[in-house]
């Protein structure tokens, strides 16, 4: 596999996960009662959409076709969250727990990609910048979860 092909594959995987995250945040915003949480989740969703767009541009710069849809696993997780909300009554605490679980996944994936030495330097730079934003959001959600428990 050529370096460009590998970069496109890694970036498209990150795009898919980031779109999963953006959709998860949008769904979380719809499922919380607290207007401050709703606003925070909408802001996080917007940031994730911005990251997806930047990653898509990077894929295009390598001559690749960027992913534009979330993964099947992400869609399934969103359906699971809907089902869980119906069963548990949809407490804000339960929503935060699910959001943090998703944050753990995306943080790990970006952290791993940022450390890939075989990615071209411009890709690692884009991934590292995105990782900084993702880690900050992850840490914010983690603190919030621990405050609620």
Image (cartoon, helix red, strand yellow):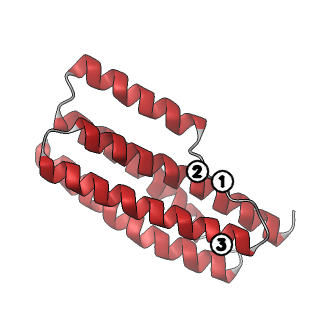
Identify residue for label 1: 67
Residue at horizontal 63 percent and vertical 54 percent from the top:
13
Question: Circles 1 and 3: CB distance less than 8 Å?
Answer: no
Counting residues from the N terminus, which is met first, the one under dot 2 or under dot 3?
A: 2
The quadrant in which residue 120 appears is bottom right
Mark 2 in CB contact with mark 3 (< 8 angstroms)? no
Q: Whole-percent x and y of residue 130?
A: 48, 70
Mark 2 or mark 1, earlier in chain: 2
Q: CA distance from mark 2 to mark 1?
A: 6 Å
Q: Quadrant of the N terminus?
A: bottom right
Q: Determine which quarter of the picture holds residue 123.
A: bottom right
User: Is residue 116 at all visible to an observer of this figure?
Assistant: no
Vertical side of 73 occupied by 3: above or below: below
- Which image quarter holds the C terminus? top left
Residue 111 on image: x %, y %? 51, 64
Residue 4 at least partly seen: yes
State the CA–CA distance, disc 1 to disc 3: 12 Å
Q: Is residue 4 above or below residue 28?
A: below
Q: Which residue is mark 3?
A: 58
Q: Which secondary structure lies at badge 3? A: helix
Residue 76 image position (x, y, % from top left): 50, 30
Label 3 environment density (alpha carbons within 10 Å; few <14, some 14–19, many ≥20): many
Outermost residue toward the right in this view? 1
Q: Is residue 89 above or below residue 67?
A: above
Marks 2 and 3, how far apart in space? Answer: 14 Å
Q: Secondary structure at mark 2?
A: helix
For label 2, the residue is 16
Say left or right for 35 vs 44.
Answer: left
Query: Disc 2 vs disc 1: which is toward the camera?
Result: 1
Residue 84 x, y percent position in the rendering:
32, 23
Q: Give the tally of numbered discs.
A: 3
Answer yes or no: do the residues labelled 2 and 1 have beta carbons within 8 Å?
yes
């Amino acid at each position: 596999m050529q370096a460009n092909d590998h970069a496109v594959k890694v970036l498209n995987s990150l795009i898919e996960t980031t779109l999963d995250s953006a959709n998860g945040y949008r769904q979380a915003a719809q499922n919380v009662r607290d207007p401050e949480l709703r606003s925070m989740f909408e802001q996080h969703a917007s940031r994730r959409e911005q990251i997806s767009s930047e990653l898509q541009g990077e894929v295009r710069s390598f001559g690749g076709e960027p992913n534009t849809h979330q993964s099947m696993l992400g869609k399934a997780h969103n359906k699971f969250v809907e089902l869980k909300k119906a069963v548990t009554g949809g407490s804000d605490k339960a929503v935060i727990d699910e959001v943090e679980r998703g944050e753990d996944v995306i943080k790990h994936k970006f952290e791993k990609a940022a450390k890939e030495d075989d990615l071209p330097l411009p890709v690692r730079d884009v991934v590292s910048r995105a990782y900084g934003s993702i880690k900050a959001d992850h840490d914010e959600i983690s603190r919030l979860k621990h405050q609620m428990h």
